[in-house]
Amino acid sequence: MARRRPPVRLGCLLVVGTALLALVPAAAAQSVNRAAIDGLNRQLLYVALPLTLFVELTLVYAIYRFHDNDDPEPTVDDPALETTWTAATAVILVFVGVSAYFVMGNPYVTPAAAGSADATAPDQADDLTVEVVAYQWGWQFTYPEANVTTRDELVVPVDRDVRLRMTSRDVIHSLFVPKLGVKQDVFPTQETVARTRATETGEYTLYCTELCGSGHSRMDGTVRVVNGSDYEEWLAARE
Ligand code: CUA
């Protein structure tokens, strides 16, 4: 009997571990994008958690209850049960799809592309626009209103909608700021748009996340989120 214990113990460990996951406190998001993505993750976690517990507990029970059953009965057809689990799975998949769709439709996660009819949408007309040029291997940020250009450092005011109009000078790159939940491919001869509103001041690392040559791993930069007056001062000092 004693040698049958480990699988049961392992099962209990899994169940407890999964339950502890839900207790991890939600850290405050640093941007509206990040808040939307974190919210989706939490929503899906709450759905996944009871399912995981159900499956693991069933498994642990089956191991414990039938471990010395040397003559198992064959499974019998049960159309009602099969219909139920198929429908339940469909409901869960629809829930996951709809939740993800709402985050994808968020105007910060998927901003109106430049040149499209929505580019002048009233809610995006007041965005602070920064023109981004990616190249092998660095980032150039231009503030058109102030005629200021920086390299590898993007400075933006907190609590303001920021619109990054991006293009590449050579190959495909991809702008990724994990802490702000911003990720968008950057193409040559084509413009893509990333959009965010940072809600916490601080320094965040920006990476290129598309393999773009031997300097790819060094193609990073800093996003500095500062308060409004610090931003104006910083900009004025460079004009
Ligand atoms: Cu640019 Cu990798």
Image (tube, helix red, strand yellow):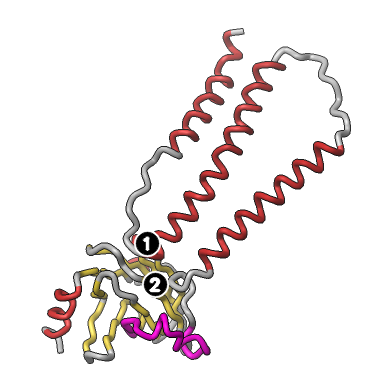
Residue at the front extreme?
Answer: 122
Viewport quadrant of the C terminus: bottom left
Q: For the residue carrying disc 2, how many other residues have a C-alpha within 10 Å: few (<14), some (14-19), or many (20+)?
A: many
Element assignment for label 1: helix
Residue at left 56%, top 25%? 11
Compute the Cα span from label 2 to label 1. Answer: 10 Å
| Label 1 crowd bin: few (<14), some (14–19), many (20+), radius 10 Å | few
Residue 93 in sight here = yes
Residue 224 x, y percent position in the rendering: 23, 69
Place of residue 213 in the rendered image (x, y in percent of width and height, measured from the top left) = 41, 73
At 34% across and 57% down in the image, what residue appears?
A: 29
Can residue 188 be seen at all in this image of the molecule? no
Location of the N terminus by quadrant is: top right
Q: Please name whichever residue, 4 or 43, is drawn nearer the observer in this view of the structure.
A: 43
Kindly tell me whether mark 2's CB lies below 8 Å from ligand 1: no
Q: In the image, residue 153 lies at what x, y percent?
A: 24, 74
Q: Residue at x 48, y 69 (%)?
A: 106
Q: Does the magenta-highlighted stretch encompass residue 121?
A: yes
Query: Image height check: is 237 above or below 229?
Result: below
**Quadrant of the rendered structure where residue 49 is?**
top right
Residue of label 1: 178
Q: Amino acid at mark 1?
A: Pro
Image-based side of 10 in relation to 54, left or right: left
Ligand 1 image-quadrant field? bottom left
The total of numbered circles placed on residues is 2
Residue identifier under label 2: 175
Side of 199 relative to 9 (left or right): left
